[in-house]
Each structure stands twice: as C-alpha cells, then as structure tokens.
Image: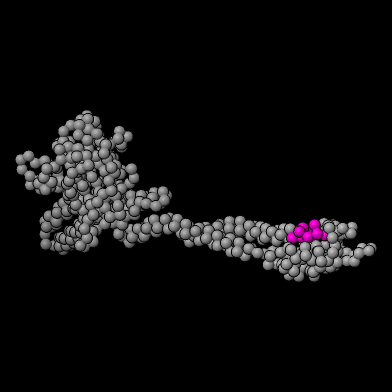
Amino acid sequence: MRWALVKVCVAVTAMVVVAFAVPLALTVKEMARDRAIGNAERQAAAIGPALAITTDRTQLERAVASTQAGADGRIAVRVPATEGTAGVQIGDPHAPDADLERASELGRASTVPVAGGYALLQPTAVSSGSVAVVEVFVPDGEVSRGVTAAWAVLALVGVGLIVGAVAVADRLGTRMVRPAKRLAEAAHGLGRGDLTVRVPEDGPAELRSAAVAFNAMADQVVQLLANERELAADLSHRLRTPLTVLRLNAASLGDGPAGEQTRHAVAQLEREVDQIIRTARAQQAQSQPVTVGCDAAEVIRERMAFWSALAEDQGREVSTAGVERPVRVPVARSDLVASLDAMLGNVFRHTPEGTAFAVDVHSSQEAVIVLVSDAGPGITDPAAAMRRGQGAGGDGSTGLGLDIVRRLAESTGGDVRLGASVLGGAEIRVWIALRPLATGGKRNHRVVRRRRLKRPAAATEA
C-alpha cells in the first residue's frame, strides 16, 4: 500500500509538471526569439533616417557602423540602382536575392531562416524614390540566449516537486501502513496463541476502529477461553459424586468377573475425570497472567457519573481530564472499578463537604497515569498513609484502601504514590505500566499537566 501510494503520487505529480512545464518551456523559447527579432528591428530602424536623407556609401557605412549589429558585421544594406544613380551594396547579405527582391516589392518587413540563424529584411524608402532593403542577421545563439538556463530551472523545479510529492506520499503511506502492519502482526500473534497481544489504538480513524474491534475481540477470546476452562473443571468436578456412588455399588457386587470388570471400569473413569480436572486447573494457572484489558477513560466516565450525584448533594465541584479518547490499560474492568471507588470514596469520607476534586488521565507509550486530586486538607504523612493502606493503621486510620490500588498497579509493574495536588490537597498517583519495565530502569512519573489555576465552569463535569 505504501509503495502504491508513492507511485500514484509520482505519476500524478509528473503529469502535472509535464502539463505546465512543457507549454512554459515553449513559451520561454518563443519569448527569446521575439526578443532577438525585436532587437534586430530596432537596429534596422536606426538605419532608416540615414537612407531617407542620402544614398551616399560613405554616409551609409558610417550609419551602419554606429549600430551594435553593424559594428558586429551583421547588417547589410542594398539600395537598387535607378536612372541616373548607381546601386549601393553595404555588407554581405545572408538572405537570397529572391527574398530581398520580394521584400522590396511587398514593402513590409519579414523574417527568413538562413544558414546559422535568421535574417530580418526591413524595406525602407530612399531619397531616389526606390525601396532599399536593410538586412539584420540574427544568429541562433542570439535567438536561444537564456533558453537553456530557463529550461534547467524548470527541470529543477519539476524534479523538486516530484521529490516533495514522494516524501509527502511516503510519510502518509507510513502513517497508514504502520497501524495496519501492527494489526496484522497482532492477528498472527493471536492466531499463534499469544492471548496477551493487543494493538495500539492510533492512526487513521478507520484503522483506529479496526484496532478497537481487534482488542475487544481478543478480550472476548480470553474471556471465552477462561469460561470454557472453568466450565470443564466444574463439569468434571460434578462427575465425582455419581462416580462415588458407582464405586460403592461396584464394591457390593462381590468377587466375580462382573464385579471386577465394573470396579476396573469405575476406577479407570475416575482416573480420566481426575486427569481432566488437573488439565483444566493447569490451563487456568497458566492463563492467570492473561488480563482482560479495559478502557480506563470509559470506566472513569462511568464511575464519575455514579459519584456525581453524591457530589452534587454535597456541593462539590467535579472535573475530569484526558477521558475524551479511549485509554486502554492491561487490567480487568472490575479491578479498576474497585480501585477508583476506593480512591473516590476516601475523598468523600476524609474531606469536608464542598471540597472540589478531579480525576485526570495521562497516557504515553509506556504507561497510563491516573491522578485523583482534591482541594482538602491533604495528607500530612504520606508514608504512614501508605502503611495504613496496607492495613497496618490503628485508631484514626484514614482507611484509604490503598492495598486495592497498590495491587492493581503492581500487577502491571507499576506503583502508587501520594503527594500534594495542584488543587491544594492530596493527590493519589496510580502508575499503570503498559509494558514490562526493563531491568535496571526507572519509572518516569513526570506528567505534562494542564495548568489549572481555577477550573472554569465549562470544564468536563461528571
């Protein structure tokens, strides 16, 4: 797709360049020719006043020599002979005699091609009553002067446009192809049995929709497999009761061949059921690290809508940020809901009524950070609060329930930190890692904050 887009852009740009450059190049060539012929006409017109006054060779040679073309030997004057006067020929004409005669008879200027260039033939009436012809030779170099340079500039501009089009097309193609390639690789990984594979939801709108659908499908596959394993283990376990009854009944059959065969069959069936249960439990244990992800932005919007009723009753100003777009995290929805409820519940329990609070979400390629901040009195001893969160607090414990939040963050390789918020109160910062942290690396908890001196009324309210 990427190279196809590049080829299309190159073809379209090349056609546009040709459509404009070729006519422009021909126009430049014609303008150069017209410029040279126009200059020759001015040179020929400079001889006209002298011919109108006299046909003396000396005077005419002096007039020819005074012009630039005459000084270069490119002007020839032919005055025909009349009764009582001899003809005058100055310079060597390049045009054939027939063309000179035709120009004299027609009485108008003309341009004829000659060897090495063009000849401008300018008829002029002389004092003797005849018509003289002034010829100005225009060499090919004068006609094409500047054309090569102009064509080179046009060629460079055309090449530059094509190169620019290729660069833009390649950039657009990369932006389109990279998400599609990631989606294909994720599909192959899921087909090979990697249930943890997920696709970043970025790129064009269509590919974002495909990524969202793929992630939802992968989550559903994980859930279905887990349900299937649980069902297999449950059904196998339910078989134990009728097997126990069969074993007891088989024991009462005596020592005959029928009894031995029945007891052997019951024992074999018990072994098969035990093997099914062990296999199902082993698969459950192996799939335990596979976490069904969820959309943190959607969960936060849903929980803030739940808590907004109580916040309105208590006169609390509520705002959210960063929840406009999907933000996927590798944790179960129920665990994220429990953690958010624990943090938001503590805001209501441990800050006065009317205290504002906010929930912000910041995402990057490495982690998602959820910030719950309030404008309350704050936490005087964050270390002690964290210990109380582990359940070690005594009388007066704040009951922050940070053990729930901590387990959620640490299950992804993240952590939880307490500090002061920009609202003036406490801030709980939950770092949810999107990928395992490299050995020896350090987490970067820097957050690009939106400046919140005073939250406007138009802020997003839960």
Q: Is residue 386 visible?
A: yes
Q: Is residue 50 above or below residue 382?
A: below
Query: Does residue 189 appear to the left or right of 247 in the view shown?
Result: right
* Residue 19 percent across, percent down from the top left: 61, 57
For the C terminus, the image quarter is top left
Question: Residue at left 94%, top 63%?
Answer: 83
Is residue 256 or residue 378 the one in the foreground? 378
Query: Does residue 225 appear to the left or right of 391 in the view shown?
Result: right
* Residue 223 percent across, percent down from the top left: 28, 51
Give the extent of the magenta segment: 43-51
Question: Residue at left 58%, top 56%?
Answer: 16
* Residue 134 percent across, percent down from the top left: 80, 62
Question: Residue at left 11%, top 43%?
Answer: 380
Question: Residue at left 33%, top 49%?
Answer: 216
* Residue 162 percent across, percent down from the top left: 53, 60
Q: Colour mode?
A: one colour
